Image (tube, rainbow, N blue to C red):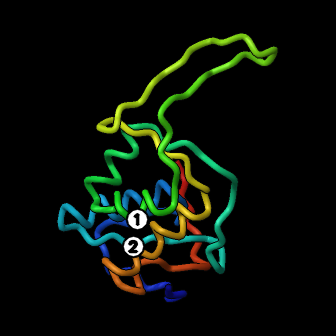
Amino acid sequence: MSTSPETTSDVVIAGAGIAGLTAALTLNAQGIRPVILESARETKPLGVGINLQPPAVEVLTRLRLRERLEKLGVPTSSARYLAREGTLLAERTFSPEEQQIAVLRGELQNMLLDTVLERLGSDAVRTGQRVEGSS
């Protein structure tokens, strides 16, 4: 990662979180080399466990990250959605083709960051760079 303020890309992404890193990989897969500007001086994995719904798993699969994702996470076969008092609101079963995967948010972010650095180079993520603008 770089702290250089120079940016030589047509696309700048604000933030090296899950969304920014995934956007960078998606653009890169289309032949566009973005630069990610992150305001923090260093990237640190934050948060707890999350469930990646099937459309999110599909995006990561198209980005050739399924194998890495499966090493980090746990596939879930079903999900139950309960009201605060425990009443069942909805239940869903997932097939192997349409998988939900539970993963630690920080581990997912690290996986995406490592992949961005591998595919786009060490200068693709610029830390200590704040994006500001006016409307």
For the point 40% across and 58% down, the residue is 22
Name the residue nearer the viewer: 77 or 11: 77
Q: Position of residue 42 (x, y in %)?
A: 64, 79
Q: In the image, which disc is placed on residue 34? A: none
Q: Which mark is residue 115?
A: 2
Q: Name which residue lies at 39% across and 39% down.
A: 99
Q: Out of 61 and 78, give the one closest to the viewer.
A: 78
Give the amino acid at mark 2.
Answer: Thr
Horizontally, is 109 left or right of 47 in the view? left
Q: According to the image, label 1 marks what residue? A: 68
Q: Left of 12 or right of it: where is 78?
A: right
Residue kind at label 1, given as amino acid type? Arg
Going 48% across and 22% down the picture, which residue do you hit? 92
Q: Where is 54 relative to 31, above or below?
A: above
Can you name the residue that lies furthest to the right here?
Answer: 85
**Which structural element holds mark 2?**
helix
* In this rendering, position of residue 87 left or right of residue 94: right
